[in-house]
């Protein structure tokens, strides 16, 4: 067949298609124009198209927010991935295994050889949390967890799901869990909600 992998779409020869049954010049032209548009694809949509195990649209959007390129994602360790809020150890392991596979690398090479270009959103380069990792615990009174997470990302930081020695801040709301104890044990700075609001300039 003409297509062994999705990447083969971007290597189709229009002259070869014209000779196929039900494929006229106009049909082929429309296909070529559509493929040309699809060569420029947002990072999250590109990740979904790779069909990595357990990486659906929500996980793909999360990865696209945290990594500024495919290369940086491919170089991520399982430990780094599993600390991202919403990933976990099993999904992190599968992502690492996927990028290590020979077939996966061949697929990526063929996609890029076919002219596929990934469109990356600009990550925040400034902000009070620039380059830092933040973890939340407990219930926040002034905003939802999702809103707080977005604030951190807008301020150049990353939100992780668990505390480690690489965590810069633990933001503590009401009724905190075991993360607060872990933060004290490893020497992570703890911000109460009012401290967090002052840091981001909330009124």
Image: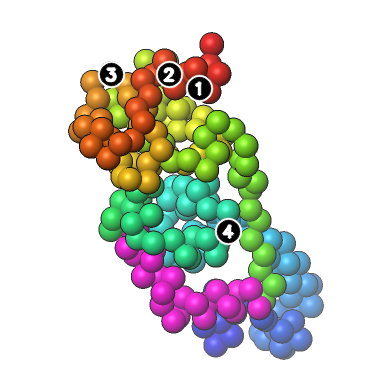
Q: Residue furthest front?
A: 187
Place of residue 172 in the rendered image (x, y in percent of width and height, measured from the top left): 32, 24
* Sequence-earlier tag: 4 or 3: 4
- 8 left or right of 18 in image: left
Q: Classify mark 4: residues with Cα within 10 Å, few (<14), some (14-19) or many (20+).
A: some
Spatial CA distance of label 3 from label 2 is 13 Å
Marks 1 and 2 in Cβ contact (< 8 Å): yes
What kind of element bears circle 1?
A: helix
- Looking at the picture, tell me which residue is in the foreground, 107 or 158: 158
Residue 34 visible in the picture = no
Frontmost of labels 3 and 2 is 2
Q: CA distance from mark 4 to mark 3?
A: 36 Å
Tell me the crowding category of disc 3: few under 14, some 14 to 19, or many 20 or more residues within 10 angstroms, Cα based. Answer: few
Res 174 → quadrant: top left
Residues at circles 3 and 2 in contact by the CB criterion of under 8 Å: no
Marks 3 and 1 close (CB-CB < 8 Å): no
Instruction: Tell which circle, 3 or 2, labels the residue nearer the N-terminal end.
Output: 3
Is residue 199 found left or right of 121 in the rendered image? left
Query: Mark 1 sits on what residue?
Result: 199
Mark 1 or mark 4: which comes first in sequence? 4
66 w.r.t. 202: above or below: below
Residue under pointer 4:
69
The mark closer to the camera, 2 or 4, is 2
Residue 80 is situated, as x and y percent measured from the top left of the image, at 38, 54
Q: Which residues are magenta?
A: 91-113
- Does the magenta-highlighted stretch encompass residue 65? no
Depth check, mark 3 against mark 1: the one in front is: 1
- The residue at which mark 3 appears reads as 174
State the residue position of label 2.
195
Q: Quadrant of residue 128?
A: top right
Residue depth check, mark 1 versus mark 4: number of the one nearer the observer: 1
In this view of the protein, can residue 88 be seen by the observer?
yes
């Amino acid at each position: 067949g003409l297509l062994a992998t999705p990447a083969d779409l971007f290597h189709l020869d229009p002259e070869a298609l014209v000779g196929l049954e039900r494929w006229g010049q106009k049909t082929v032209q429309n296909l070529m124009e559509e493929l040309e548009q699809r060569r420029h694809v947002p990072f999250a949509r590109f990740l979904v198209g790779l069909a990595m195990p357990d990486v659906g649209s929500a996980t793909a959007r999360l990865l696209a927010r945290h990594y500024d390129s495919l290369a940086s994602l491919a170089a991520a360790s399982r430990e780094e991935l599993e600390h991202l809020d919403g990933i976990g150890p099993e999904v992190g392991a599968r992502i690492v295994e996927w990028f290590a596979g020979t077939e996966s690398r061949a697929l990526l090479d063929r996609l890029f050889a076919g002219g596929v270009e990934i469109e990356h959103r600009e990550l925040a380069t400034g902000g009070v949390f620039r380059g830092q990792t933040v973890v939340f615990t407990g219930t926040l009174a002034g905003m939802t967890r999702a809103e707080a997470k977005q604030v951190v990302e807008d301020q150049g930081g990353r939100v992780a799901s668990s505390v480690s020695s690489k965590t810069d801040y633990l933001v503590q709301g009401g009724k905190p869990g075991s993360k607060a104890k872990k933060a004290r044990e490893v020497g992570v700075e703890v911000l109460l909600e009012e401290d967090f609001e002052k840091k981001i300039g909330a009124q």
